[in-house]
Amino acid sequence: MTQAAAAQPSKPLLEVEDLKVYFPIRSGVLIDRHIGDVKAVDGVSFEIERGETLGLVGESGCGKTTVGRTILRLYEPTEGRIVFDGVDVGSLNPAGLRKLRRRMQMVFQDPYSSLNPRQNVGNIVGEPLQIHGIASGRDMEKKVAELLDIVGLPAGAANRYPHEFSGGQRQRIGLARSLSLNPDLIVADEPVSALDVSIQAQMINLLEDLQKEFDLTYLFIAHDLAVVRHISDRIAVMYLGKIVEVASADELYTSPAHPYTMALLSAVPIPDPEIELQRERIILKGDLPSPVDPPFGCRFHTRCPFRQPERCDTEDPALRPLPEGNLVACHYSEEIRSGALTPHDPTP
Ligand SMILES: Nc1ncnc2c1ncn2[C@@H]1O[C@H](COP(=O)(O)OP(=O)(O)OP(=O)(O)O)[C@@H](O)[C@H]1O
Ligand SMILES: [Mg+2]
């Protein structure tokens, strides 16, 4: 345990406070004009405890990757704070940031495009050790062999190249590389989405084993709620740049509080045929609105089957706690759950 961690044992490992990440849109051939922003992340706050796995889910384009990359400062935040192990990441000078980056690593969705095809696996996995001056030569080879063994690859893999491996094995290579610096936090951005269903479970089991063995904390990004359920302690659901619900994995599945979470769950099959037949399905109509010009009031109102125009179209709901401990950003969660409001077409 680091000194900072010993001094403040109850502090979360990661705190994200009101994070905004806007990408400017420019136009003009002769004069460069700033004509708007893609509000990819627009006021997101959450914490991750040490050793915890927080799942982050939501439709394509809702800002999940942007959150992950900004935590590692691969993108600059437009506003807000990221505090890692008590240190405000934004206040660090380049040297401090480099040091901190060793403790946070990212695992990518497409293991092929993130591995250099011209380097052999030994160099790919060992490169961070060399860059940070931790090991080289024989020492590095030994460490690489150990890392390959940890992720379940044969020692001979070191002399081979990424294209000689299957998708699942390539994901293991990427994982070995990100483990090489002994990180505390791993941001796993859809680490199993590109893999065959049969391989996905193996990969998730491996991630869980590694978490125990190395005291890892995970931010696990996925667009599918079925994938994150087993690995996550808590799950945060994003919609159009904002978090709409945070709950323990069990609570989120058994009694979701936000209509968007309900809709995402409607797409997940339930193994019990009786419940499967009885449950009410919420099928979302319409496209995801543009993050350049998000809807006023509650961003979900244009697609929400429980929309109450007077309030939902005008007042942005804050993320508020429910008695069970869920956090939800909806004005009418209680009424929806009790059945006082019934689903209808969102366009009046
Ligand atoms: N570098 C960038 N420059 C401009 N816009 C960007 C950039 N990266 C992302 N965006 C935009 O920001 C929004 C959020 O993108 P992001 O990749 O974070 O979503 P996501 O939830 O990870 O989606 P997916 O499930 O498809 O991976 C999208 O509208 C995207 O087009
Ligand atoms: Mg993404």
Image (spheres, rainbow, N blue to C red):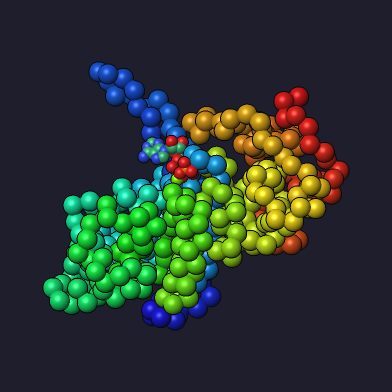
Q: Can residue 320 be seen by looking at this rendering?
A: no
Q: Quadrant of residue 160?
A: bottom left
Q: Residue at x 48, y 64 (%)?
A: 202
Q: How many marks?
A: 0
Whole-percent x, y for residue 5 in the image: 44, 77
47 or 251, which lies in front?
A: 251
Q: Is residue 344 above or below residue 268?
A: above
235 or 78, which lies in front?
A: 235
**Image quarter hosting the N terminus:** bottom left
- Farthest residue toward the right? 340
Q: Is residue 311 above or below residue 51?
A: above
Q: Residue at x 13, y 73 (%)?
A: 137
Using residue 80 as the reference point, say whether residue 119 is left or right of it: left
Q: Residue at x 18, y 67 (%)?
A: 130
- Farthest residue toward the left? 137
* Ligand 1 quadrant in view: top left
**Image quarter hosting the C terminus:** top right
66 or 167, which lies in front?
A: 167
Q: Residue at x 46, y 62 (%)?
A: 203
Q: Quadrant of residue 161?
A: bottom left
Whole-percent x, y for residue 217 in the image: 47, 68
Whole-percent x, y for residue 123 in the image: 20, 63
Whole-percent x, y for residue 240 in the image: 55, 39
Q: Can residue 208 be seen by looking at this rendering?
A: yes
Using residue 236 as the reference point, say whether residue 26 is left or right of it: left
Using residue 101 as the reference point, say whether residue 274 is left or right of it: right
Q: Is residue 320 above or below residue 348?
A: below
